[in-house]
C-alpha cells in the first residue's frame, strides 16, 4: 500500500527496503500512501481512543504494534498566560504526558514496530536524551536489544536514568550529538542494526499524530502550530500528516507551521530569514535546552518546506526566555516541562511582542517533554527548600506568620 519516496528527486522504493537516504541523490525519504485506497472515515477514528493508533490507516505498521499506549496527551487552554501575552486562543499540547515523558514515544511505537515488521532484531539511535529513553523503553517492550549513543556530559539526568534502567547499551561519546548521529548511522549500515533517529521515515509517521490529535481535540484546524525545533523531524512530521488529512478531505486548510530554536543553536531560523536554499550547519551549538542543542538538523530540508509552504516562520529565543517560560508554564498554568519544550511558548510570546503574530490567532504550541526529564536545570532555578527544626514555632517563623 505504501512506499518510500525521495523528497528531492522523487525516486520511489518499496516500503520493505531498509533505507535511510535516497540511493540516487542522497536526500531524505518519506512514506507515501495511496490515499485513494484509504477508506477510513472520521467517524471510525472518533470511535477509537485518542492515541497514535486511532489513526492506524495512515500508519505503515501491519503487524500487532509494540505499544505502551502513547499519545492521547492533554491539550490545555493557556488562559492565564494567554491573557498575559494577549492571546485568547493559546493552547499547549503536553507531550510530556507520554509513557516515557516525551513525544518521541509516538515515533518509537511506530519505529520499533517497523523494526519487527522488517525482521530487524536490534535497534540503535544517537540522542540528546529523549530518543534514547524512548527507544530503550520500546526495545524492552519488544524484547530486542538497543544501542544508544549520547554526547558525553550533555544529556539531562532523567533521560540517562531511563535509558539505563530500561536496559539499553548506553555509550557516551566525547563529541556532540551531530557526531554521535554520524557514528551510529555508520554502525547501522555496517552491522545491520535498525536506525531509529528521525532520519528514519517510519519514525516520523508516528509523530505526525500530534497534529491529528490536536485537531480532534480542538474541533478545528488552528491558525498556527508552534514547535521547538532540533533535528526538525517533529515539525516536518506534523506538516506531512496534515497534508495527508487535507488530501483525504478531512480538513480544508493548513496551519502556519512555526519553528522555534534556541539562540545558540538556530540554523533553521537563519535559513528561513535569509531565504537560503538549505541550512548552514552550526559547528558549536549551545543552549540550556539540551533536547534542541543541534547544529546540523537532519530534517532541515523537510522543515524548510513545511514552514515556507504554510506561510509560517522560524524564530529563536534566548536561554533566559526559555527558562522564564518554563517557570511561567509551571507556576501560572500548572504545566511542568523541560526547557526545550518551553521554547515553543516562549517563541509565541516573542512573536506577539514583535508583531509577527496576530492576537486573534488560534495557536497550538507543542510542549515536548516532561519537567522531570531535567531536574538539574529545575533545581538551579529554584530556591532550595527551607530546612527548619521540627517544631511549630520554627514552622511559623519560616512562613513569616
Ligand atoms: C527531540 C526533542 C525536540 C526536538 O524535536 P526535533 O524533531 O528533533 O526537532 C524538542 N523537545 C524535546 C523535549 C525533544 O525531546
Ligand atoms: Zn533522491
Image: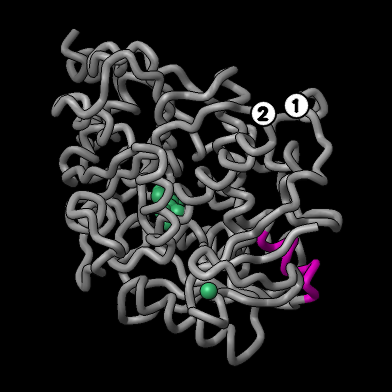
Q: Residue at x 58, y 86 (%)?
A: 189
Residue 266 seen: no
Query: Residue 376: x percent and y percent?
Result: 30, 50
Tell me the SS state at disc 2: loop
Query: Residue 79: x percent and y percent?
Result: 37, 12
Q: Which mark sits nearer the N-terminus, 1 or 2?
A: 1
Q: Which quadrant holds residue 141?
A: bottom right
Image quadrant where one finds the C terminus: top left
Secondary structure mainly formed by the magenta segment = helix
Contact, mark 1 vs mark 2 (Cβ under 8 Å): yes
- Rendered position, 275 above or below 390: below
- Along the line of sight, the residue nearer the viewer: 231 or 141: 231
Tell me the SS state at disc 1: helix
Q: Which quadrant holds residue 398?
A: top left
Closer to the camera: disc 1 or disc 2? 2
Query: Residue 7: x percent and y percent?
Result: 52, 63
Residue range corresponding to the magenta coloring: 111-119
Give the residue pinned by disc 1: 42
Image quadrant where one finds the N terminus: bottom right
Residue 27 is one of the magenta-drawn residues: no
Q: Residue at x 39, y 24 (%)?
A: 363
- Rendered position, 310 above or below 306: above
Q: Residue furthest bottom?
A: 190
Instruction: Name the colour scheme.
Output: one colour
Query: Residue 77: x percent and y percent?
Result: 44, 17
**Category of crowding for the residue at label 2, using alpha-carbon neighbours closer than 10 angstroms: few (below 14), some (14–19), many (at least 20):** few
Distance between the Cα atoms at labels 1 and 2?
A: 7 Å
- Rendered position, 11 above or below 191: above
Q: Residue at x 55, y 82 (%)?
A: 24
**Category of crowding for the residue at label 1, using alpha-carbon neighbours closer than 10 angstroms: few (below 14), some (14–19), many (at least 20):** few
Q: Residue at x 84, y 56 (%)?
A: 62
Give the residue pinned by disc 2: 250
Amino acid at each position: 500500500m505504501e512506499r518510500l519516496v525521495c523528497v528531492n528527486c522523487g525516486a520511489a522504493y518499496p516500503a520493505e527496503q531498509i533505507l535511510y537516504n535516497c540511493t540516487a541523490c542522497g536526500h531524505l525519504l518519506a512514506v507515501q500512501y495511496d490515499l485513494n485506497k484509504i477508506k477510513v472515515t472520521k467517524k471510525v477514528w472518533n470511535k477509537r481512543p485518542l492515541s497514535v493508533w486511532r489513526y492506524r490507516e495512515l500508519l505503515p505498521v501491519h503487524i500487532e504494534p509494540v505499544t505502551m499506549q502513547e499519545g492521547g496527551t492533554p491539550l490545555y487552554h493557556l488562559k492565564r498566560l494567554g491573557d498575559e501575552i494577549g492571546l485568547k486562543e493559546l493552547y499547549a499540547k503536553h507531550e510530556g504526558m507520554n509513557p516515557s515523558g516525551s513525544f518521541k514515544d509516538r515515533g518509537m511505537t511506530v519505529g520499533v514496530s517497523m523494526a519487527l515488521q522488517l525482521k530487524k532484531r536490534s535497534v540503535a539511535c544517537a540522542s540528546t536524551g529523549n530518543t534514547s529513553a524512548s527507544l530503550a523503553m520500546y526495545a524492552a517492550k519488544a524484547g530486542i536489544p538497543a544501542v544508544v549513543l549520547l554526547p558525553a556530559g550533555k544529556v539531562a539526568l532523567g533521560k540517562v536514568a531511563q535509558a539505563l534502567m530500561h536496559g539499553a547499551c548506553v555509550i557516551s561519546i566525547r563529541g556532540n550529538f551531530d557526531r554521535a548521529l554520524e557514528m551510529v548511522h555508520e554502525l547501522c549500515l555496517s552491522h545491520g542494526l535498525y536506525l531509529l533517529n528521525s532520519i528514519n521515515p517510519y519514525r516520523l509517521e508516528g509523530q505526525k499524530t500530534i497534529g491529528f490529535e490536536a485537531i480532534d481535540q480542538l474541533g478545528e484546524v488552528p491558525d498556527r502550530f508552534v514547535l521547538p525545533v532540533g533535528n526538525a523531524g517533529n515539525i516536518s512530521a506534523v506538516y506531512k500528516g496534515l497534508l495527508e488529512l487535507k488530501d483525504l478531505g478531512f480538513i480544508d486548510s493548513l496551519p502556519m507551521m512555526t519553528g522555534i530554536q534556541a539562540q545558540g543553536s538556530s540554523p533553521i531560523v537563519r535559513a528561513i530569514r535569509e531565504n537560503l536554499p538549505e541550512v548552514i550547519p552550526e559547528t558549536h551549538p549551545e543552549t540550556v535546552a539540551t533536547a534542541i542543542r543541534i547544529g546540523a538538523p537532519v530534517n532541515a530540508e523537510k522543515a524548510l518546506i513545511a514552514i515556507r509552504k504554510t506561510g509560517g516562520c522560524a524564530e529563536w529565543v534566548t536561554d533566559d526566555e526559555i527558562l522564564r517560560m518554563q517557570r511561567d508554564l509551571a507556576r501560572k498554568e500548572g504545566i511542568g516541562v523541560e526547557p526545550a519544550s518551553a521554547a515553543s511558548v516562549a517563541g509565541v510570546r516573542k512573536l506577539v511582542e514583535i508583531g509577527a503574530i496576530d492576537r486573534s490567532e488560534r495557536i497550538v504550541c507543542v510542549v515536548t517533554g516532561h519537567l522531570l526529564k531535567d531536574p538539574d536545570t529545575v533545581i538551579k532555578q529554584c530556591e532550595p527548600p527551607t530546612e527548619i527544626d521540627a517544631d511549630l514555632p520554627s514552622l511559623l517563623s519560616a512562613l513569616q506568620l
